[in-house]
Amino acid sequence: MNYLDRLNSAQLDAVTTTEGPVRVIAGAGTGKTRALTARFCYLADMLGIAPSAVLCVTFTNKAAAEMKLRIRRMLGDFDLGYICTFHSFCVRLLKEDIHVMNFPANFVILDEDDRDELLLKVYADMQLTLKDMPLRTAAEYIARRKNDVDRYIPYFLEFDNEDMLRRGIRNADRLEEIFMRFIYEQKKNYACDFDDIINFTAYILEKHPAILSKWQTRMQYVMVDEFQDVSPRQYHIARMISGAHGNLFIVGDPDQTIYSWRGADVRLLLDFDSLYPSAQTIVLDENYRSTPQILGIANTLIAHNSCRYPKNLVPVSPDGLRPMMYHARSERDEAAWVVRAIRKLTESGVAPGDIAILYRAHFVSRSLEEELMRKEVPHRIYSGTPFYGRQEIKDVICYLRMLVSADDIAFRRTVNNPTRGIGRKRMAFIADAAAESGCSLYEALCANLDDPLLARTGARAYVEAIETARAMVGTVSLGDLMQKLLDMSGYEESLRTQAQWERLDNLAELKRAIEEAGHDDDETLDRFIARTALVTNSDRDSDEGAAVRLMTVHTAKGMEFPYVFVCGLDEGIFPSRRSASPEAIEEERRLAYVAFTRACKGLFLTDAEGFNHDRSGKTPSRFIYEAGTEAMDFPRPLPPQQPLAPLPADASPRDARFRSGDTVAHPVFGYGLVIEVDEAIGAYVIQFQKLPTARTLRFAAPLTSIDSEKWQD
Ligand code: ATP
Ligand code: MG
């Protein structure tokens, strides 16, 4: 069994301990993901478990795809349907069971773009402008409001949407009215945003024992990679699903928690054994990825964090070169040095795809990219903008959505794109007609095609294109279907007449994706659309090997590269100036630890002299000094560390984020209940489960929101 041969004894333990709760805690590069993959093979191959009975949760779609590839290589073709992210798993579940929330299986998934579109509709209804309130403020309120699951999901269960809205906006302040109208629009379109996907799933499992039991029976083994960044609610779902068989296997590294801002809570990993007293804990401490020199500075750096689970990480790889730190004269000099070093590597035979450039924030990539272009080094940016979020891709997906859900959001996006003479006035007419008869915009359009107002527009051609294509669903391949729609709607033609070559290239890429998906037998149009909503650019990788990869450290999570450049290591950039509190600095330090530990053979760090946007002088990141300058080489001398500026007083939240009755988690005190909010001194009074007496904590304290059932647990 070659997948077992290549494991050490601790990994073997993790692989063969298949029953009951198991936790693997281990540092970067110790073979956690490899053990998880081998465990899947072992279950399927040695124990004969049906692969479809194993839920294996990864952090990104890309990680899932990679894991499937490896497993297929070892085992051959199997249905590996449940190797996926939490979000994709929840979408699978909702496709089967969302009917209990009165939603159809072809519900719409709102990405950020769609959400903004829907919000703009709400703004229009309320006669608000972006000056009155930025979209972001509204979106943040909605997200925050949805944290309180029990106070919002019931809205979705009410039958009479109009009545719900009427009651909901009575006496509501402006934000709450936006929220209620947003929910109203969501219900009208049968639309879920990313938060709902998780919340609905948890809710359905909680409230519908028969559904819970179906999924519990089906998923006999549950495994979660990168557990340190799982949110409490995702954990709750994993616990429920594994509730019957009790086989929950989690792997994680507390030192790599980098999503606290999204609700990740390292306590979940550390307290696993108190929730599961029978849990077995397996520790891996041999690092196979990095040279001792690279690991040395990563270990020295992370030792500066006070809130951690002490671990010992021993390098297995042979000695390599010392990490090199270049203190550049300017950003230009920094970029030039990086590109020179890359060329030296490639000239010595290193493939460009074996090199990655990582940074804390996207803007750092600009000067690097310019220089790479100037020197004609093949490279590729893994940007944060989702591929499927690009305008032209989104347009076509919305056209496809017209065939499946024909929701109002997709309608608004497509009906006058390309121009069909349906501007604001005619849109208002359609909207009025829809409101009057309580139907969707598309239905209203179809019913009024003979109205004189629509006579000389392209409305009829639009409806014909959609109806013709819809009649073809299921009879032709997905690729042909899409092509038909592109032709009949005139969309592709309009890009061509505008000479939008890049957009056309992207469409070609989408066609390839949909054709590839079409090879999978059970891929329907409906499922393809659901999947696209969850895919980001960093998930897609066609030309690996050929190009240097540029990405943020967050994106690089779980990956490894022979040679890594970490650029923009300046105070204020990395750590980010927005992370001023001691806890936030610890998170930045973990992020730097993640960055350094991506490297196998060579690690290069850079910063640049010059000025920040606020005209203050730039200084090298504290992380360079903390990582131990004696263990690095410096082509140009590094200035001595400047005293760090005191934390700006206003960097911490001045407003209460929690109300009394909320349940919260604290990295040291654990779970607690807010019993009082004292606005006068800007503090909460919190009763922690583990502490005999209540504590008073500043609003800025490192608290995260948790589900209330945690508190009872
Ligand atoms: P991270 O914390 O970054 O997610 P990880 O713990 O998941 O890291 P892996 O990515 O699984 O680590 O493994 C790191 C590298 O070490 C990979 O290249 C993997 O193939 C290799 N590796 C893992 N286990 C062994 C082993 N027993 N023998 C040889 N190489 C190994
Ligand atoms: Mg891993």
Image: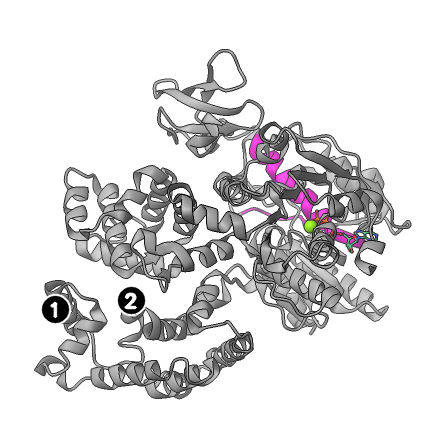
| Residue 128 appears in the figure | yes
- Residue 426 x/y as whole percent: 15, 74
What's the distance in space between the residues labelled 1 and 2, CA to CA? 16 Å
Please state the extent of the stretch shown in magenta in the rendering: 583-612
Badge 2 local density, few (<14 within 10 Å), some, or many (20+)? many
Q: Quick check: 682 above or below 330?
A: above
- Residue 343 x/y as whole percent: 78, 67
- Relative depth, front residue between 541 and 235: 235
For the point 60% across and 66% down, the residue is: 79
Residues tagged 1 and 2 counted as in contact (Cβ below 8 A): no
Mark earlier in primary sequence (1, 2): 2
Which mark, residue 407?
A: 2
Q: What coloring was used for the rendering?
A: one colour
Residue identifier under label 1: 433
Check the image and name the residue furthest to the right.
318
- Relative depth, front residue between 529 and 572: 529
- Residue 198 x/y as whole percent: 44, 48
Quadrant location of residue 259? top right
Check the image and name the residue furthest to the top.
693
At label 2, the amino acid type is: Asp
